Image (cartoon, helix red, strand yellow):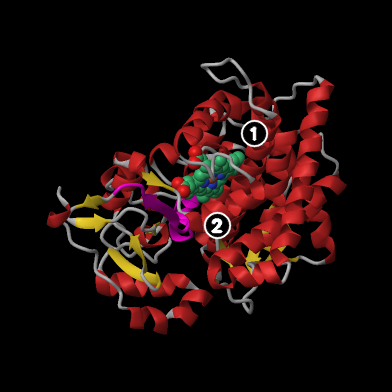
Amino acid sequence: MSPTDTKQAPVISPLRTIKNIPDFVKNPIPVLDEYISTAGDTFSLYLGPGNKATVTADPGLIQHILQKNHRNYRKSHLQTDQLAHFIGNGLLTSDGDYWLQQRRLIQPGFHRKKLSGLAGIVLGEIDLYLDRLQRRITENNTVDMFAEMTELTFNVVAKSLFSSDVEKRVLDQLSDHFNRIQSFVAKKIRQPFLSSWFHLSGEHQKHEAVAVALKDIVRNIVRQRKQSGVHPDDLLDMLLDVRYEDTGEGMTERQVLEESLILFIAGHETSANALAWTWYLLCRHPEAAARIRQEVETVLGDAPPTFESLPGLVYLDQVLQESMRLYPPAWILDRVPVEDDAFEGIALPRNQNIGIYTYGVHRNPKYWPDPEKFDPSRFTKEEIKKRPAFTYLPFGGGPRLCIGANFAMMEMQMALARMIQRFDFELIPDRPVELAPLITLRPKNGIWIRVNKRQDVLVQ
Ligand code: HEM
């Protein structure tokens, strides 16, 4: 299609955009939803003078960008460069040939056979966490489920990467450093106009120092592992072991370090979000929680879940999928056309940011009748088949589909099943739950839940 055959996506006027800035900074989701309701599934808005971005909740266009013409798209500088600056160049933050080379190298590490090897580590860590939770609730049984699930998923990723090489003190340091860097990156992305101030005030440099400390810790772990000659069945072993097909060489120390950090970053906050929102939904829909408990009792009894028994937890899986439809942890994805492109007559100019608005697609009434309703039956095999491609993309799509998707599903299914076996949950009514869409879709003030040990449980 020649450029003359294309037209611009409907543009949200600069005046309207400016008027909405305060609301947008607080929570962009209602503002984007309002734009969709008046401008349609694909529209453009001004990010600053002469700086436009396109936002889309159209599955056809999304498939075009992520799959059919993916070679013409790279990640935007908005998010990726900030993360790459502090954490480094790994799968999540790289593009082009380097990304492809790394993806081919690391992908086999997440295949089914490898996952079944990791299942024991994951379950072990879930049980250790649940013992801690049980001790904690004897003193105070009101907990913030987002903080809880962050602790759980951080430990699961840490152990899946480094097995038992890391003592608790070091894990706490890692967690603290990651949190500080992630919060700062989110702050920079939301307030790009304060970039110079962050440098002048020394905040940027302070966080660079935190990143150096973080890398020192992980570099030490990697070096100790190499010297030990030990080969536990974990992700670090996989990263150290893999060989490039053409050269037969492994990754350099720096590459191993950066890919480990990326797996940490990509692999814990997302799962923590999904689990926390799932608990929120289950507390609001006790009938769904009761049905999961019934299923868990039938399939597992009091036995722990295993890699092999997880496919039997069909309803639990549907609940997780529905939870990620309503609250997709990666609520928006970013891409930039490398060359001018077009889709169904809409121009997609080179270098103009595109926001793939997953949250909007997941609540688009054209594909999801009564979209606000929590309804896990949307994810029966038959219903899934009926829906067009790219109407559901919690893990993205195309060649850059989340590499940890199966790992995350295994971890979340195991955690939910194990928690339901041991505890009862109840939402605290006077602690309203709000969205805080940062890099991931967090609950603004946490999700406060009362947790009680089940009286009739045999599992300890
Ligand atoms: C519920 C949990 C998770 C969700 C919702 C999620 C979501 C996503 C999404 C949407 C992407 C694509 C980003 C884009 O195209 O711009 C992605 C990529 C990625 N995810 Fe996940 N993720 C989850 C868990 C994990 C876990 C557990 C790991 C690793 C242990 C992981 C590692 C990665 C990596 C390395 C990438 C980059 C892949 C590439 O570009 O080749 N994720 N994830």
Q: Earlier in the sequence, mark 1 or mark 2?
A: 1
Toward the viewer: 267 or 384? 267
Is 336 one of the magenta-colored residues? yes
Q: Which residue is mark 1?
A: 255
Amino acid tagged 2: Thr
**What residue type is disc 1 on?**
Gln
Q: Please tell me in which quadrant of the rendered image residue 215 appears.
A: top right
Q: Which residues are magenta?
A: 318-339
For the point 79% across and 27% down, the residue is 225
Q: Are marks 1 and 2 in contact (CB under 8 Å)?
A: no
Task: Identify which residue is drawn at 62% across, 43% down.
Answer: 262
Q: What whole-number distance in Å separates the C-alpha atoms at marks 1 and 2?
A: 35 Å
User: Observer-nearest residue: 418 or 46?
Assistant: 46
Residue at position x 63%, y 22% in the image: 250
Whether residue 135 is visible to the viewer of this picture, yes or no, is yes
Mark 2: which secondary structure?
A: helix
Q: Nearer the viewer, residue 149 or 342?
A: 342
| Mark drawn on residue 278 | 2
Q: Position of residue 349 (x, y in %)?
A: 29, 56
Residue 13 horizontal side relative to residue 162, left or right: left
In the picture, the disc for residue 285 is none
- Residue 417 seen: no
User: Given this view, does label 1 or label 2 mark the residue nearer the observer?
Assistant: 1
